[in-house]
Image (cartoon, coloured by chain):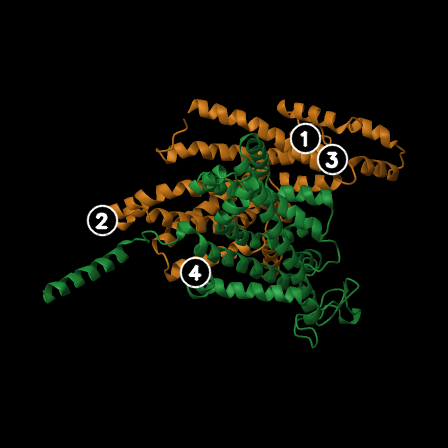
Amino acid sequence: MGKYVVKRVLLLIPTIFIVCAIVFILMRMMPGDAVDIIVVRMRNAGKSVDADQVREMLGLNVPPVIQFFSWFGGVLRFDLGDSFFQADSVSEIIFRQLPISLELGIISLVLANLISIPLGLFCAAKQDSLADYILRIFAVFFMSVPMFWIATLVLFYPAKWWGYAPEVTYYSLFANPIKNMSMFLVPGILGAIGQAGTQLRITRTMVLDTLRQDYIRTAYAKGVKQRDVLFKHAFRNAMIPVITIVGGSIGALVGGNVILENVFNIPGIGQSLVTALGYRDFPLVEGCVLIMSLFVMIVNLIIDLCYKWIDPRVSFD
Amino acid sequence: MQFWKDLFKKKTLCGICFIFLILILFVGIFADVLAPSKMVNGILESSLLDRMKPPGTAGHILGTDSSGTDLLSYMIYGARTSVILCVCCTILSTLISLVLGILSAVLAGTFDLIVQRIVDAFGCIPQMLLLLLLMAMMGNGIPQMVIALAVPAGIGGSRMVRSAAFSVKDSGYCKNSDLLGGGFIWKSVKHVLPNITPLVIISAAGQLGGVVMMEASMNFLGYGVAPGTPSWGYLITNQGRDHMFDAPWLCLVPGIAITLLTFCSCMFGDGVRDILDPRLKGGVGSYNSKKLKKVLAKLSAKEEKSGEAA
């Protein structure tokens, strides 16, 4: 077990390197850069600056390969560089915004699981019944609604009809828990429903798949009650692929958060990523993408380690 | 043939969704004929006199937008954009995943190791962020959108193709092909490819739905089709959101269209998987206590009958 964990963590390093390289290459191939924007801004403010001077100040004058390795060296020392436009370093900005994005993500994930797993089990137990069909059609429907569209509708129409509008000013959870929750609840639910649709279908398929195994037939033949077969024999075995899918959907959740944060004005990483991308603020964009990718990697690692706990047959050696 | 029979008989809803998809495809292809107002030099005909007409106005069934463009025509041309994106993305991403996956499996060794590390890394970057970076790099437009959507999806899908191809590669006929002197291209095309086709079709059908949705989301973030290209997502972002109260149809109609198209694609993809996936076919069937009791009742009735006859 210990050996396996060490091996997996060490394997993360080449993956991080490749992710860094991909992000870096994509960023440097973008048209336009921060230097032009800074020069224009300074000129509008009445100061004349030399573009080369700005470039040197931002460290963009050296060849890209050297830029990459100095940045990657910094990443290994947990130093993500300085933002081109903001006074704080990238690490400080991310450290400030990560909890906000995490809160939204966790609310969505918990809600999605609370909705999808019981309903998925129910659908599998009542396979091909009317309730099963209706729930599945709703699941696909919720997966198909574009999130930014429904979010905009939720933001505007309740305000017109019932005089209700979700909070769009951010308060910290500890400073003002009620306002914080009233801000996060609506985007959390919106993030959860699409996710829940996907998970419901997968839970159902996997439980059904397990229900076709021989040991389930044996259990029925022994005279075990359906409830016990479902929960004790089928559910636990069906959970492995379901958890894999939950892990795989973390990426989609992070992506969905980018949209929700922009609609509901939540000052998380997604919002600052989109803004920074517009300004070509290379270190900030690279930092944000790297942190989100790292988050996905770590969640996947934890999930792989969870297999052993769920399924005793799995061995890592 | 059996496939189509199954699709319409066993999965009626999927059949309906399939018909709807075909309809959208035809609307996209014959947009020039179907649309009430025509596209002139890449711009839809419009008249400022008809600004913001509500749905049901004579000549404008779905109303008009803030520059007097007929919404129905806009939606029809938008369907063309969606169709182009869906078809091109699915084909391109399937090709990429096939080439990468089969090469990885058949060549194996160092090539496989390197490619899999890169595929892993791509898998770690959330799709939305990768799309944002790619679109920011290439600029707005339909071809750029196709590449940005298809490349990450293709790279992600290659993993599934690889694992399927691996299991085929180790089977007896592939080894015999090796012994008979078949090269790796011969082996890939003649032996591996036909055996993983159902899987590839399933994954391609499953991808259809995501494309329209992603395109709309990217439009919302400002990295979508080029301005002026009729697109449902673009309409919501640039007109619908500004006129939520005075012209709600500008937001509702394209949103419903996107939802419907995605819904139908998902349902169709699902149906295709249910029919083609060998793992879901046949087997011992599903058991629950009710069914089992019915079967038992039948059996005992039969036994009684045969007993009486004897």
Specify whether B199 is left or right of A224.
Answer: right
Q: Which amino acid type is shown beneath numbered disc 2?
A: Ala
Upstream in the sequence, badge 4 or badge 3?
3
Tell me the element at label 1.
helix
| Mark 2 on the same chain as mark 4 | yes
Residue labelled with disc 2? A221
User: Which colour denotes chain A?
Assistant: orange
**Which chain's colour is green?**
B
When asked about the image quadrant of residue B186, the answer is top right
| Mark 4 on the same chain as mark 3 | yes
In front: label 1 or label 2:
2
* Quadrant of the rendering where the C terminus of chain A is positioned: top left
Q: Which amino acid type is shown beneath numbered disc 3?
A: Arg
Residue labelled with disc 3? A28
Residue labelled with disc 1? A90
Which percent across, then down, holds residue B74? 70, 65
Mark carried by residue A134:
4
Q: What crowding class fits label 1: few (fewer than 14 Cα within 10 Å), some (14-19), or many (20 or more)?
A: many
Q: Which amino acid type is shown beneath numbered disc 4?
A: Ile
Whether tag 3 and tag 1 are in contact, CB under 8 A, the answer is no
Tell me the element at label 2.
helix
